[in-house]
Amino acid sequence: MREDYPILLVEDDENDVMLMQRALRKANVAAPLHVAGDGDEAVAYLAGTGQFAERVRWPLPGLVLLDLKLPRRSGLEVLDWLRSQSGLRRIPVVVLTSSREVPDVDRAYDLGANSYLVKPGSPADLVAMVQALAGYWLHWNEAPTTRGVHDPHDPHARPA
């Protein structure tokens, strides 16, 4: 169970961030939410570099919610990078985007997305989606370890 792990939301639209924060509260999701506003910031967070070097303060997420249309580095580029990192490639990634384009869906799965969801149109639907995501990925799902990366939640990870 990873209910104490944070959720990393990779989203550049401040309104969507606010809607997600509200949906998490209404869905009673206890996992903390960390936000990366662009693809480069997401990579820095996941790699534990720069301002995110302190893993106790910025622990690895139990779930990444990844938008595709991002500045600096696209969501697909973030996903490709993440899946190439031996210690991080097991982190569940749910693409959460407004794109229904078949090439985006196919490419996301080709790169290793665990799921692809289109952002719902209403706040009530977003709350329902968040409840389902949190229940599945943070409660019921048996999560793999993130070996080789300092992660305060993972007893097998090496210290920094």
Image: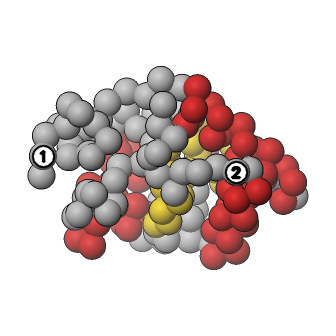
Q: Which residue is mark 1?
A: 159
Q: Residue 31: image x %, image y %?
A: 54, 51
Q: Residue 67: image x %, image y %?
A: 58, 56
Residue at 23% from the left image edge and 33% from the top image edge: 155
Q: Residue 152: image x %, image y %?
A: 27, 46
Q: Which residue is mark 2?
A: 28
* Label 2 Cα crowd, 10 Å radius (few <14 / some 14-19 / many 20+): few
Tell me if 38 is positioned left or right of 156 in this view: right
Query: Is residue 79 at all visible to an observer of this figure?
Result: yes
Secondary structure type for disc 1? loop
> Which corner quadrant of the image does residue 49 belong to?
bottom left
Residue at 63% from the left image edge and 76% from the top image edge: 14
Secondary structure type for disc 2? loop
For this rendering, which residue is in front, 127 or 29? Answer: 29
Q: Residue 97: image x %, image y %?
A: 66, 54
Q: Amino acid at mark 2?
A: Asn
Q: Amino acid at mark 1?
A: Pro
Query: Is residue 106 at all visible to an observer of this figure?
Result: no
Circle number at residue 141: none
* Label 1 Cα crowd, 10 Å radius (few <14 / some 14-19 / many 20+): few
Residue at 34% from the left image edge and 36% from the top image edge: 89
